[in-house]
Image (tube, helix red, strand yellow):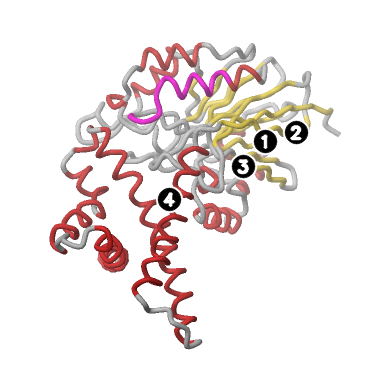
Amino acid sequence: MWRVFSVLAIFLYSFFCFYIGARLFSFVRFFLPRIKAPVFFIFFALLSYSFIIVNFFRFNRVFIFRQLSSLWMTVFFYIFLSLLMFDIVRLVLFFCRKSALTPRFTFTGTAIALGLSLVVILYGAINVRSIRTVNYNVSLSGQGNDIRIVLISDTHIGSTIDQGWIARVVDTVNRAQPDMVCIAGDIFDGNLDAVKDTDGIASQFRRINAPLGVYACLGNHDVDRISISGGGGNERIINFLKEAGIVPLEDEAVLVGESFYVIGRRDVRPIGMNSVRKTAAELLSDLDRERAVIVLDHQPTQFVQLEEAGADLLLSGHTHGGQVFPANLITRSIFKKAGGTHYGYWQGRTMQALVTSGAGFWGPPLRVGTRSEVVVIDVGFFPAL
């Protein structure tokens, strides 16, 4: 079944690429009338399948090829959508007996469609670099003084997100003057050998000023696939976090300030690894229920289980809020049907949750319809009835 689906997906993608290529070829020939179709389509085919070529031939180590392949899928979608909308308009005009099939009209419409795509892509490239601060107020049943928690997630440190990006994230965190910082996974984008300066990045994390500590769970991308031959592991990532002054929690609970617990869960589906993790009930079974329980779980998929187990506040990431339109509409629908949310604040019967869109990005360096963010949570405690 999976093979049939894969073949169908490749066929449809190839058909859509041919549709785009044919339209672009006609457009390019307006400026370069002597260009040969074989030359154009060979180049276009290499671009269309660049994400496969780059990984198969290990060109992902070359920055320009890696960036080109990661950008293409988003560029492909917006160009396809713009051209499709133009062709629908042209079809409507044709049936209304308007002159909509002339070369000049086709050229003008294609130019407008490509221009709109370029504007959206440029906006996404600029927007992704803006890291905003989002504030929430949360009240939890328990004991202790009010605290400020800063939540970050999905930094995806790797070949693209580097020390400079993390420095800006840390500056944003410190400006919020947190008591505690929580990192909800996908700190790395897999393979520490792709990171240019791990010592420099660790030094940036050590700049975080949080009296109650910095705690992290791992995400599905926090897998160092180079460290273990033929598989994946996270030993070097765990060691990095410890050296950076971050407390990694893998299905573990710690009591913070003698007033509340922080639990960090193993990820449910780390890439390339078999993951066995405790259930929500097992994690909370031995805790003092008079104290509040804050859970870090990278993927926001177990709202119901954690609420039934007695968690008070869930902090997650993973979704990027969809990162680019219309993926945000898709993730919103998926996680809503799962009983939770893909972004923002969620209120259950006894548990609250916050899902962040992340402080970085994955894949193309674009954000359309979403923002990179650092989440500031002011938490107040009230006595249990």
Which of the pair 68/249 is nearer the observer? 68
The verdict on residue 292 being magenta is no
Question: The disc labelled 4 sits on which kind of residue?
Answer: Leu
Which of the pair 325/250 is nearer the observer? 325
Q: Are marks 1 and 2 in contact (CB under 8 Å)?
A: yes
Q: Which residue is drawn at 42% across and 12% down?
A: 243
Numbered circle sitting on residue 138: 2
Q: What element carries label 4?
A: helix
Q: Which of marks 3 and 1 is in front?
A: 1
- The residue carrying pointer 4 sits among few (fewer than 14), some (14 to 19) or many (20 or more) residues within 10 Å by Cα, namely some
Please determine whether, in this image, residue 315 is positioned above or below residue 122.
Answer: above
The quarter of the picture where residue 259 lies is top right
Question: The disc labelled 2 sits on which kind of residue?
Answer: Val
Circle 1 is placed at which residue position?
A: 313
Choose the circle earlier in sequence order: 3 or 1: 3
- The residue carrying pointer 2 sits among few (fewer than 14), some (14 to 19) or many (20 or more) residues within 10 Å by Cα, namely some
**Start-end of magenta stretch:** 159-171
Circle 4 is placed at which residue position?
A: 118
Choose the circle earlier in sequence order: 4 or 2: 4
